[in-house]
Image: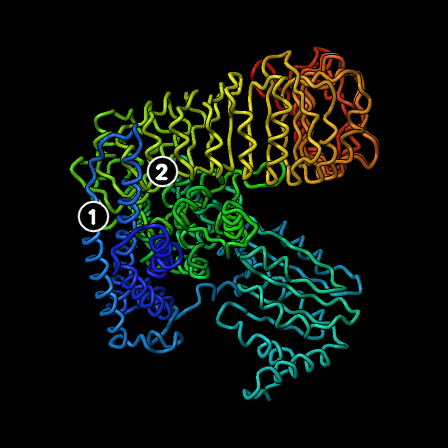
């Protein structure tokens, strides 16, 4: 954690001060000294930081790391003081700004604090020799760097009878292993730590290896990756004559030796527990393609590694191992706690507690076995088990029975770069089992300064880089996807229960965050950085929260105005304030003095107005008003020249006054009501950084002006336009060069014809046309067929013909099709080869249709059909199951009187 704090200061905050804040003339010299010392400390810190988190580390090392972290926090705070003072001076020039109540540090005070920090850091750096920190990182801490055992050491030797819920996985892997194709096959088994990858693969390895001329099991891990080729050579060839003198030459010799030895042999090799994608580069040339049915198996926690491990002329498979079902998880738990012969009655108080323990394990076998092992040492009575359940958060890090699983999680955490560690720790701020919007998470990471582009020339936006961070955590099986958009983007995500416990414990231990739970007394940690309030707001108002950088208030009782005002008035250096879903009906006046605020989230609150003092927040980058009651914003919003996201999405939209061209950093602007015009549409042409634009109540006469603005938005990815009233035509044909990256379009309103630029969008993945009222036009689908990347197509009251004909080879990537409110539509024809990837069909309110199209059975991968508002005859046929189905169809749902009726299965 100290490494994380140091990197944040070096990467983000020090350059910010040097570039933007006027300081005492001697201060830059002292800051450069501090930066130099930080870089020297950083060289020794990574391993020391890791060691300090382990119980075997010496007290001196732990104390040294703690002091480094404290100094990093002091540096961060003094830099924020500088920025606060600077922003407050600029805000004084705004006529709508009230009198602030926070005192700012003088330039001399700032200088004195920076000098003191420099001296403290210098003293700390010099003490490293006392602790032996001048040694190489491999010798940094005398003794073991890991526990004296491998937490997976028993995984390879489990009896098959002990394995639960693996039959489907086992059968699939056996099928891949036994196919005779006259070429090598690579099988990667991917999953989070503790799922049983090693156990399952070893079980198959022991049974299958007799069919091969030679075999090798290589436990890669991180400690062996440097000597991987050597270990492979020794295991397969028994060749021990390997010199250390010239490693490159010896590597070439080993590769040649292996290729020669394996040239006429059918071989099987398992690479277990691969962490680094470069391990494959070391060994792949040593594994020759010799026309035999060779088998290479790889287990890893990282999907990216699995995808990279390929060979020419080799068959390639990836199996993603899933957690156990609830039934199988309970079966494993019962077997480990009660034994194979014991039976627990439904009325037994331990039954409910057993289910609680199993649900916390999220289907991870290692976790189930660990907790079962802990309980097997306790008395079998409800009181004892309740105490174990209630203290599980503390036990996971220090109880011997759970230590093995803790080490498995710690391995995954230690393997992360510091910026990914920060991003993972952030999940601890949210309640357990909370499904987090990926957009919200990414915006918070950015506001906190966790996300960094490689250089100023990096073509990616900061949001795209943050999205790659999230993808990396998902690839590493640390973060789970809760929901996806139809085009495959992550919509919501979460971490499982025990991972949340691990992350929260680590975050609280290191002052990264503090969570206030119901029925817990509040006592702010020293230099606590982030505060998450899950309980009713009843916190001592006399506290000073100067060190808190982010504050979350989740659903609780009604937030009383005086208490909330008093609470927020004690913050000073706050960067992120998140009220999403909280019972809030106003924006407290205390917010006007939060000069460093970058992120303000009022989504799903009852806030009705945004006061003029919003213009005080000159550093604000993200303002989220989605699903609030705000329908108008004052011109003071235009002082926020750093604003990148203005999300004002309600059923009515939000009205803006003239002057929006000042916000030329805007990347997201939704949902703007332009019915009153006022010059807003004409000013949009200056917002050239726009990525997502949402406009409502557009009048026909303004269509051409909007088109001119859209043409200038070269980076636009998402566009939503809603017409003013049911008769106002969307006049949008005049775009000669549409934004090339446009991926998602929503047009809601009458169209005289389909704009001719839409079929030219080569990256379009989602198209929604509503109320378009296109006349009987048999060319509608023909015009859209060239959208080769289209994944999601919705036509709602768009087509007035009687037949829609999907021809062969059309819409090859389409996965979701919605056809709704087509009053004259009678027939849907689907030729063989059309929409070959369609998974979901939504059909509703088409009164002329009397049955499900027969051609549906040609959609071989169709998984679900959702129906609503069809004719009585159609409904009767569905109830009688008078329809043909595709082999993969898993459900047919009919919405009737507000209720979903499952017709199939």
- Mark 2 neighbour class, 10 Å CA radius: few under 14, some 14 to 19, many 20 or more: many
Is residue 811 shown above or below 233? above
Q: Position of residue 131 (x, y in %)?
A: 26, 74
Is residue 822 shown above or below 348? above
- Mark 1 neighbour class, 10 Å CA radius: few under 14, some 14 to 19, many 20 or more: some
Q: Secondary structure at mark 1?
A: loop
Rendered residue at 46%/55% (across/down)? 366
Q: Residue furthest left?
A: 542
Residue bearing the label numbered 2: 618
- Residue 453 placement, left or right of 212: left
Rendered residue at 26%/45% (across/down)? 85
Q: Position of residue 502 (x, y in %)?
A: 37, 52
Give the quarter of the image for residue 605.
top left
Q: Is 563 or 231 nearer to us in this picture?
A: 563
Rendered residue at 70%/25% (across/down)? 733
Residue bearing the label numbered 1: 105
- Residue 485 placement, left or right of 39: right
Is residue 187 shown above or below 884? below
């Amino acid at each position: 954690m100290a490494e994380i704090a140091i990197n944040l200061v070096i990467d983000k905050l020090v350059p910010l001060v040097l570039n933007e804040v006027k300081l005492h003339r001697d201060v830059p010299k002292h800051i450069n000294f501090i930066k130099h010392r930080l870089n020297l400390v950083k060289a020794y810190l990574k391993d020391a930081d890791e060691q300090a988190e382990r119980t075997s580390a010496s007290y001196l090392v732990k104390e040294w790391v703690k002091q480094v972290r404290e100094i990093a926090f002091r540096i961060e705070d003094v830099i924020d003081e500088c920025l606060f003072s600077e922003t407050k001076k600029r805000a004084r020039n705004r006529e709508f700004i009230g009198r602030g109540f926070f005192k700012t540090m003088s330039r001399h005070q700032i200088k004195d604090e920076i000098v003191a920090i420099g001296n403290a850091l210098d003293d700390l750096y010099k003490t490293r020799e006392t602790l032996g920190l001048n040694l190489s990182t491999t010798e940094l801490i005398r003794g073991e760097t890991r526990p004296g055992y491998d937490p997976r050491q028993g995984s390879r030797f489990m009896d098959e009878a002990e394995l639960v819920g693996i039959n489907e996985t086992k059968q699939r892997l056996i099928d891949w292993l036994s196919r005779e194709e006259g070429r090598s096959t690579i099988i990667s088994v991917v999953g989070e730590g503790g799922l049983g990858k090693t156990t399952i693969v070893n079980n198959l390895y022991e049974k299958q290896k007799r069919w091969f001329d030679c075999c090798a099991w290589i436990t890669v891990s991180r400690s062996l990756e440097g000597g991987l080729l050597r270990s492979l050579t020794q295991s397969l060839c028994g060749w021990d004559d390997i010199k250390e003198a010239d490693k490159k030459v010896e590597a070439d010799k080993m590769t040649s030796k292996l290729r020669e030895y394996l040239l006429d042999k059918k071989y099987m090799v398992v690479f277990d527990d691969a962490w680094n994608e470069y391990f494959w580069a070391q060994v792949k040339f040593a594994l020759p393609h010799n026309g035999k049915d060779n088998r290479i198996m790889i287990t890893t926690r990282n999907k990216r590694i699995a995808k990279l491990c390929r060979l020419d002329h080799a068959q390639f498979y990836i199996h993603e191992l899933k957690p156990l079902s609830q039934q199988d998880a309970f079966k494993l738990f019962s077997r480990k706690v009660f034994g194979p012969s014991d039976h627990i009655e439904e009325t037994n108080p331990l039954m409910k507690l057993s289910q609680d323990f199993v649900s916390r394990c999220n289907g991870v076998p290692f976790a189930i076995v660990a907790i079962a092992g802990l309980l097997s040492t306790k008395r079998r009575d409800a009181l004892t088990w309740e105490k174990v359940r209630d203290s599980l958060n503390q036990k996971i890090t220090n109880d011997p029975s759970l230590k093995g699983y803790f080490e498995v999680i710690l391995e995954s955490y230690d393997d992360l770069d510091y910026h990914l560690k920060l991003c993972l720790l952030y999940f601890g701020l949210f309640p357990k089992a909370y499904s987090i919007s990926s957009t919200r998470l990414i915006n918070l990471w950015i506001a906190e300064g966790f996300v960094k582009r490689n250089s100023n020339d990096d073509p990616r936006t900061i949001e795209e880089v943050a999205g790659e961070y999230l993808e990396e955590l998902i690839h590493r099986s640390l973060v789970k996807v809760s929901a996806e958009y139809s085009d495959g983007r992550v919509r919501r995500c979460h971490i499982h229960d025990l991972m949340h416990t691990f992350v929260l414990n680590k975050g609280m231990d290191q002052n990264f965050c503090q969570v206030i739970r119901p029925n817990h007394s509040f006592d702010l940690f020293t230099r606590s950085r982030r505060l998450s309030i899950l309980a009713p707001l009843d916190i001592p108002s006399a506290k000073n929260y100067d060190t808190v950088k982010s504050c979350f208030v989740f659903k609780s009782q009604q937030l009383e105005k005086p208490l909330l005002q008093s609470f927020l008035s004690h913050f000073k250096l706050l960067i992120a304030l998140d009220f999403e879903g909280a019972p809030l009906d106003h924006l407290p006046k205390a917010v006007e003095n939060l000069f460093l605020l970058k992120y303000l989230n009022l989504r799903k609150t009852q806030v009705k107005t945004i006061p003029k003092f919003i213009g005080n927040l000159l550093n604000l980058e993200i303002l989220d008003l989605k699903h609030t009651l705000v329908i108008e914003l004052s011109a003071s919003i235009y002082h926020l020249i750093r604003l990148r996201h203005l999300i004002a999405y309600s059923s009515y939209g939000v009205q803006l006054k003239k002057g929006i061209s000042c916000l030329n950093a805007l990347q997201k602007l939704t949902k703007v009501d332009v019915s009153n015009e006022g010059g807003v549409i004409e000013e949009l042409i200056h917002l050239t950084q726009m990525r997502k634009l949402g406009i409502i109540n557009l009048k026909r006469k303004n269509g051409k002006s909007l088109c001119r603005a859209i043409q200038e938005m070269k980076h636009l990815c998402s566009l939503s336009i809603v017409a003013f009233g049911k008769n106002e035509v969307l006049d949008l044909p005049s775009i000669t060069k549409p934004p090339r990256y446009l991926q998602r379009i929503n047009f809601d309103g009458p169209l005289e014809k389909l704009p001719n630029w839409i079929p030219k969008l080569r990256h379009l993945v989602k198209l929604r046309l509503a109320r378009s009222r296109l006349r009987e036009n048999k060319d509608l689908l023909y015009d859209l067929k060239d959208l080769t990347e289209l994944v999601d197509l919705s036509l709602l009251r768009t087509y007035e013909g009687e037949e829609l004909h999907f021809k062969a080879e059309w819409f090859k990537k389409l996965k979701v099709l919605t056809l709704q409110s087509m009053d004259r539509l009678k027939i849907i024809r689907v030729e063989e080869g059309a929409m070959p990837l369609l998974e979901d069909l939504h059909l509703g309110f088409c009164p002329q249709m009397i049955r499900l199209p027969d051609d549906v059975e040609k959609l071989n991968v169709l998984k679900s059909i959702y129906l609503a508002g069809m004719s009585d005859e159609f409904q009767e046929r569905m109830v009688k199951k008078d329809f043909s189905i595709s082999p993969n169809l898993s459900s047919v749902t009919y919405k009737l009187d507000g209720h979903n009726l499952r017709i199939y299965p």
